[in-house]
Amino acid sequence: MANIEALKKSRKNERAAFTKASELIALEDVDICELEAELNVFKGKVDRLEHTHSNILELLPEKDYDAEFEIVEDFQDKAIRIETNARRIINGQRNLIVPETLSSVSDILFDPPSTNKYNAFEERLIAEFSDSENKQIRKILSEFQLDKKLTPKIKQVCHNTVHYIETTGPPIHGKSRRLCPKIYEAVKQEYQFMLEQGICRHVVVKSSGNIRPLGDYRKLNAVTAPDRFPIPHIQDFSHALHNKIIFSKTDIVRLFSYSGTPRRHKENCSGETFGLFEFLFLNFGLSWSSADLSEIYD
């Protein structure tokens, strides 16, 4: 009986030794060069990602990045997304953001912030792309002033699109509404800005200069004849963005202010409370305004 137990123990030790030897043999069969090559490839991916990271940060203002920028590193997509508080988004997918990666003017568009704290970003970006083969890039950057809410005062529009308000029945009138003090001051500043830009004007000039917007056009929209100008299909729009890596809304900032209204329709958009105003350009809240914007794009 003792011999049987000793034999079982001996065979168990032999199996353990054989298993350990097999594992060592399997490990020796692994190509060490392949492991080193895969490790080098991985290190190269990390280095490229960090290099792209540093190149993008060089274009940004020298300040506390942790406070102003949200940096997300995705090793699966090899992409870096930097999103500022002004909603500027820069996407770098494998390629660095350098002049050679820009194939056309439509590749370089920016969403201008409402303040001038990113003015240094504009200057450094213009310098970065000054040597690009496509000189239109620098021209476009120099035309847009990113430290303002709008481009310089609108003098004339470069298209023939106007917003007609064909109505039926008697004139529509809506009662003006009171505003809380906080919104009241914000509305006053906005109307003062629109007056300076030439977007609206006083119908009756008041000595006090107090202003207040009127945006409730529901009664007017109910009696307005529809405009059936076709709106682009969403798939056609997304197709135009194929292979683009930088996106922005600079070219559509206050686009409503570039669509005029005929003289005989201006009185339909007038507003009153402590000042009577009429809008010289398309105003928010009017029905079928999307058709006018589609016509401007075309």
Image: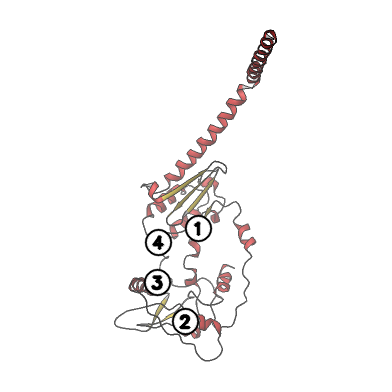
**Residue 114 shows which numbered tag?**
4
Residue 215 quadrant: bottom left
Image quadrant holding the C terminus, namely bottom right
Q: Name the amino acid, label 1.
A: Ser
Query: Residue at point 36% right, 72% down?
Result: 183
Task: Say which residue label 2 marks.
Answer: 269
Whether tag 3 and tag 1 are in contact, CB under 8 A, the answer is no
Query: What's the residue type where badge 4 is placed?
Result: Ser
The tag earlier along the polypeptide, 3 or 4, is 4
For residue 156, above or below residue 1:
below
Pointer 3 residue: 197
Secondary structure of the residue carrying tag 3 is helix
Tell me how far mark 2 sits from mark 3, CA to CA.
Answer: 18 Å
Q: Are marks 3 and 4 in contact (CB under 8 Å)?
A: no
- Between circles 3 and 4, the one closer to the viewer is 4
List the single residue furthest toward the left.
208
- Rendered position, 15 above or below 228: above
Q: What element carries label 2?
A: helix
Label 2 and label 1: CA atoms lie apart by 30 Å
Separation of marks 2 and 4 at Cα, in angstroms: 26 Å
Between the C-alphas of marks 1 and 4, the distance is 14 Å
Q: Which of 102 and 244 is in front in this view?
A: 244
SS at circle 4: loop
Callout 4 crowding tier (Cα within 10 Å): few <14, some 14–19, many ≥20: few
Q: Position of residue 82 (x, y in %)?
A: 47, 49
Q: Where is residue 220 in the image (x, y as percent from the top left)?
A: 51, 83
Instruction: Residue under label 1, please give it.
Output: 248
